[in-house]
Structures are given as structure tokens and as C-alpha cells.
Image: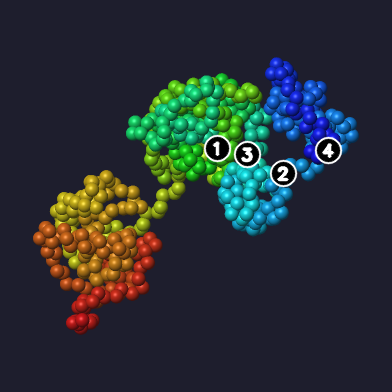
């Protein structure tokens, strides 16, 4: 501080008068008490008044006792001696304006250089509302030194705060693509919950919690312990071969604000999730809602309780039948599981109870769940489920068809998300009418020498002789194809899939060989598909060849029939009551002859 010449002379004379050590000790004791009560200006003036009171040598003695510089004590003595000096400074200031080193932020060009440096490290699209910077404070300070500006990281932090920067982590709020019926499904779920609660019916939120490893594994969070005594856990979280993993499945009762958690060591399948609901109903739900007839379940769209999981619906049907409850299910849209009540009403509090403590045994996990309470009255009841739930269980199409037809009642709006499981199946639907048996010409009509070229008695005897090898050939063919014997004996199959007996095979062969009928015409007479005629004739030929039987070669008719009308006329001339059946088989309008076939009307060809 600037001092007048007379004051400097006065203070200079006061420096060189000796003060005893005892007096300095008294001053030091006084100064130690007063220092914390005075600001910089008051402290300076106070030291000056003590120096003036001591007279000559007071400045040096006070400086030694207070640990201050003699310049500060002399400036305070000058201010105390000059009343006008006390009014020079504005109220609240201890020094004259301009005193001290200028602030680093006031350096010309520093602010512009910092803005340019932060702009280079900025990440994010130029039109996005969210941007961030990849440079740390120390990196920015080093870069500023290279630009010729000396400032600390604290100064950089202050300037960045003034510009709106702050140290932030990531915020998990972006949900990606939203389903078009998301809002409508939320409204539907809220309306269902309100209706059930108004009627006094139970409403539960169901979900599976994250799997947890048992053992000395690290868990997030902090807990109060004595200093220097943290809980010691493994240095890594890689599971060992014998590590046991628990699978908690929670049920949150919305009306009662009660949690129920089933803790198992098996797979978190749909059977495990439904069994958790079953245990909740047996131990709490049936007692809390004795007159309940319906149950509403809200859950996610994926996982063990997913909307597409067949096992989930199968197990719910069994539970509904056992409990006698119409169980209605509402799934949240994909990607919206955080809106399920159990996430922020139950699971978050269990995680808080488990924080900073390893789960050494399943009993520790159960005890932590049982100790979970909140100020709003939440209480949790855990149970152990030591049963095994194998993964990979498949529900057959027949079972799903039965459930869809008789047990599941889907809502008209988003039926894949909203459906009800009936406690008792609906009456079985009326059976569909059996398909009409394809018409065919009876065997005794077709077994005529004019059609087969073999006497009827001989054809019957031949069929009886070939019955055993024919059945053996069928069994061998079925074992080769399917690896087991045929389930149905010959002739016991439904008439819609009727098998041909050995007589039909021989008739198909003779109709083709004797009358040269095409496969469509022979199939129409036998009531079978044209492709089956080809298989029947081939099998009959194999059996005859294996038995070394040669059929008599009867002369064909003078002119084989070439149209259906000619076939009917030919049968009528032979006295055969033949009627073409109306079985849907397309009888060809003209029977084409097979290649290289010699007939009385056509010469033999060599092609």
C-alpha cells in the first residue's frame, strides 16, 4: 500500500526499539485468538494499533509475534494513524482496486483460445441437442500451455462452468424404434388394472430378476464400515466351475404393496416363473383375496414370460385349472419393460439391500430379500424353489391347437399381447364331417375275365396265395423307410386313406395289361389316385416275380376300349354291370395306347 513520507519515517523509527521476549509471547497469544475473527484489512489495522501502542520497536516485535511481514504491520500502523486512510477503501474491500495479480481468465485471447480448443474436441452431430467433449481438464490445460496461456485445470474448470459445461455421465433414455400400438397398449393395461382393483380382484406384476452368482463376488454400492476394513471379495468376476447361480423371479402385488420372490438354482424357464405365481397364490394370494375369481398378470413381452412362449401359456393353463381362476395376461410392448411396476417398486429395493455385500449362499440372498422394506410400507416374502426346471421343453402343435381352441381367449385388440386363460376348457367343437369315401367299382365286378383276362376263381386263389408275401413286402418297405413296423394292420386304416389289398394290386395290374387302360382310368375304377396305380402295378409285378408266378396271357379284346363310352359298351357286351363312379377322379375322354403296343387295328412299330 502507498504510504506518505512522514509515515514511512515514523514507522522506520519504530522498527529498531527492542521489545522483550516476554512481551512478544503475550502478543503472540493475543494474535492467535484474534486472527480468526478479522478479515485481511481488520487484521492489518489491528497489528498496526498494537505496534503503535508499543512505541519504538513495535513494528518488528508485532511482525515476529504475528508471523506477518513488517510491511503489512507498518501499513496497518499508517492506516491507524491516518483516519482518512480508513475511508479510502469501499465497504467490503480489504485492498485498493487493482491490487494483486490479475485473474487468469482476464488474460487477453485466453477465452477465445479455450473456446476453439473445446470446439475441436466436441463430439456429436452439429444439429443435435446433445454434445460432449472427449478432452479432460488436464488435457485442456496442457493444450493451452502449448498455445502460450498458462492456466491451471481449476481455472479451466471454472471457465467451462461459466460457459455451461458440466461433468456428466451417460443418460439411458433413448428407446429406439417404438411400436405403433405402444400408447394404446399402455392405456389398455391401465384400464384393466383400474377395473380389477375397483372390483377387488388381484393384480400382480411378474418378471425375472437378473441372475446372481453365489460367492465372494463384487457387488456395486457402498456400506458403512469402520475405516480401513472393507469387505474383501475376488479381484475378478469370472465364474468358476462350481459357482452356483440363483435365478430370482418376483411377483409384486400392486394393491397390497407386497413383494414375493421365488429364488431358485435351476433354469429361469416359463415353468419356473409360473410356479412362482403358484407359490404366491398358495401362500399369500388365496389368503389375501379369498373371494377372487380372476387374476390379472402384467409382464414383459420377452424372456420366460414372453408373449410368444408356448411353455408360458401351457403352464398358465395348468395353474388356472388348479387355482380355479380366470387368468388374464397383459404384455407390455417390446422395449418397455422399465414401465412394469415390479422394476421400480420391488427389484430396485432388493438391489439396494444387496449392495456392497457378497451373496455367499442362497440363504444370504433370501435373508436380504426378507430384510427389504421401504418407508411406504413395502415388505417382501422370499421362498426357496429347489426344484429342477430343464431348458428346451417343447410344446407340441397338437397341445397348442387344443389351448387355442378350448383354453385361450384372445382379446379383439392386440390378441397376441392380451389374452385370458380359462380355468375350465370350453366344450369341444363339433367334429368335422369325415371326408366322403371315394367311390369305386366293387372288386367282384372288376374281377371278371373280360376285364382281367383271368378267370375270377383263379384270381381269387392267386390273391390268397400272395397274401403272406404281400404283407411281408409292405412291412419290409415300412421298416426301411421309418425304422419300425407299421402301426395299422392292412385294412384298418381310415377309409380316407384306405390301403389297397393284394386283390386290388392284381386288378390294377391286369386292367393296365389286358385292356391297356391308362392310370387315370384304372384309378377312377379303383377309387385311388393315378400315382397310386403306378405304385400298385409295380408292387404286384415285384411280388409275382419273387414268387415266380407267370400270369396266363389271355388274348386281348379285338378292339380295346378307347373312351369311357366304349368301356361301358364293352362291359355291357360281356354282361358286366359296370358303372363309372362319380368320385372326383377325372376319367380321360380318350384312352391313349402305350408305346410299342400291338393291337389288331394298329401295325407294330419299332420306335
Residue 101: mark in rendering: 2
CA–CA distance in space, label 3 to label 2:
67 Å
Which mark sits nearer the N-terminus, 1 or 2?
2
Q: Where residue 34 appears, x then y in whole percent?
A: 75, 22
Residues marked 1 and 4 touching at CB (< 8 Å): no
User: Residue sitting at 60 percent across and 39 percent down?
Assistant: 339
User: Residue sitting at 32 percent across and 61 percent down?
Assistant: 529
Q: Which residue is mark 1?
A: 299
Which mark sits nearer the N-terminus, 4 or 3?
4
CA–CA distance in space, label 1 to label 3:
10 Å
Q: Which residue is mark 4?
A: 5
Between tags 3 and 2, which lies in front?
2
User: Residue sitting at 45 percent across and 44 percent down?
Assistant: 401
Res 440 quadrant in image = bottom left
Q: Where residue 397 appears, x then y in whole percent?
A: 41, 45
Q: Which residue is mark 3?
A: 189
Task: Give whichever of 201, 398 is nearer the camera.
Answer: 201
Residues marked 2 and 4 touching at CB (< 8 Å): no
Residue 399: mark in rendering: none
Amino acid at each position: 500500500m502507498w504510504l506518505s513520507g512522514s509515515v514511512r519515517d515514523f514507522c522506520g523509527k519504530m522498527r529498531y526499539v527492542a521489545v522483550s521476549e516476554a512481551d512478544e509471547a503475550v502478543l503472540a497469544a493475543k494474535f492467535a485468538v484474534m486472527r480468526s475473527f478479522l478479515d485481511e484489512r481488520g487484521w492489518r489495522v489491528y497489528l498496526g494499533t498494537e505496534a503503535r501502542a508499543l512505541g519504538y520497536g513495535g513494528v518488528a516485535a508485532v511482525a515476529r509475534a504475528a508471523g506477518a511481514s513488517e510491511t503489512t504491520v507498518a501499513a496497518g500502523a499508517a492506516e491507524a494513524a491516518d483516519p482518512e486512510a480508513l475511508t479510502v477503501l469501499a465497504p467490503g474491500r480489504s485492498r485498493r482496486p487493482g491490487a494483486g495479480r490479475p485473474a487468469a481468465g482476464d488474460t487477453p485471447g485466453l477465452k477465445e483460445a479455450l473456446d476453439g480448443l473445446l470446439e475441436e474436441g466436441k463430439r456429436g452431430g452439429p444439429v443435435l441437442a446433445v454434445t460432449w467433449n472427449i478432452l479432460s481438464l488436464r488435457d485442456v490445460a496442457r493444450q493451452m500451455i502449448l498455445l502460450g496461456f498458462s492456466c491451471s485445470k481449476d481455472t479451466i474448470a471454472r471457465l467451462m462452468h461459466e460457459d455451461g459445461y458440466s461433468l456428466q455421465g451417460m443418460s439411458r433414455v433413448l428407446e429406439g424404434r417404438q411400436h405403433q400400438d405402444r400408447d394404446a397398449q399402455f392405456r389398455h393395461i391401465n384400464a384393466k388394472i383400474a377395473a380389477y382393483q375397483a372390483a377387488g380382484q388381484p393384480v400382480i406384476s411378474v418378471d425375472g430378476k437378473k441372475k446372481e452368482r453365489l460367492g465372494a463376488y463384487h457387488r456395486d454400492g457402498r456400506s458403512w464400515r469402520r475405516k480401513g476394513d472393507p469387505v474383501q471379495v475376488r479381484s475378478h468376476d469370472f465364474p468358476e466351475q462350481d459357482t452356483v447361480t440363483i435365478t430370482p423371479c418376483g411377483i409384486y402385488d400392486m394393491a397390497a404393496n407386497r413383494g414375493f420372490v421365488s429364488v431358485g438354482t435351476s433354469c429361469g424357464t416359463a415353468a419356473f416363473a409360473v410356479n412362482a405365481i403358484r407359490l404366491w397364490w398358495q401362500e399369500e394370494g388365496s389368503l389375501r383375496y379369498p373371494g377372487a375369481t380372476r387374476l390379472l398378470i402384467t409382464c414383459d413381452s420377452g424372456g420366460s414370460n414372453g408373449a410368444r412362449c408356448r411353455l408360458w401359456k401351457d403352464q398358465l393353463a395348468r395353474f388356472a385349472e388348479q387355482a380355479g381362476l380366470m387368468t388374464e395376461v397383459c404384455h407390455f410392448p417390446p422395449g418397455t419393460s422399465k414401465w412394469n411396476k415390479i422394476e421400480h417398486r420391488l427389484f430396485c429395493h432388493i438391489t439396494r439391500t444387496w449392495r456392497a455385500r457378497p451373496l455367499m449362499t442362497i440363504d444370504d440372498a433370501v435373508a436380504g430379500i426378507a430384510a427389504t422394506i421401504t418407508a411406504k410400507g413395502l415388505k417382501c416374502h422370499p421362498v426357496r424353489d429347489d426344484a429342477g426346471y430343464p431348458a428346451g421343453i417343447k410344446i407340441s402343435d397338437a397341445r397348442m391347437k387344443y389351448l387355442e381352441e378350448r383354453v385361450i381367449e384372445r382379446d379383439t385388440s392386440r390378441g397376441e399381447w392380451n389374452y385370458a386363460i380359462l380355468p375350465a376348457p370350453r366344450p369341444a367343437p363339433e367334429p368335422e364331417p369325415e371326408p366322403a369315401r371315394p367311390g369305386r367299382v366293387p372288386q367282384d365286378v372288376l374281377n371278371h375275365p373280360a376285364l382281367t383276362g383271368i378267370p375270377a376263381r383263379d384270381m381269387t386263389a392267386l390273391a390268397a396265395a400272395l397274401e403272406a408275401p404281400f404283407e411281408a413286402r409292405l412291412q419290409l418297405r415300412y421298416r426301411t423307410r421309418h425304422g419300425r413296423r407299421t402301426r395299422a394292420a392292412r385294412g384298418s386304416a381310415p377309409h380316407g386313406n384306405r390301403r389297397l389289398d393284394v386283390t386290388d394290386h392284381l386288378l390294377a395290374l391286369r386292367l393296365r395289361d389286358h385292356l391297356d387302360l391308362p392310370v387315370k382310368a384304372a384309378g377312377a375304377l379303383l377309387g385311388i389316385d393315378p400315382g397310386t396305380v403306378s405304385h400298385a402295378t409295380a408292387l404286384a409285378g415285384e411280388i409275382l416275380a419273387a414268387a415266380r408266378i407267370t400270369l396266363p396271357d389271355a388274348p386281348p379284346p379285338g378292339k380295346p376300349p378307347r373312351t369311357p363310352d366304349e368301356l361301358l359298351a364293352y362291359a355291357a357286351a360281356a354282361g358286366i354291370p359296370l358303372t363309372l363312379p362319380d368320385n372326383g377322379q377325372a376319367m380321360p375322354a380318350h384312352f391313349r395306347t402305350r408305346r410299342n403296343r400291338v393291337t389288331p387295328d394298329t401295325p407294330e412299330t419299332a420306335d
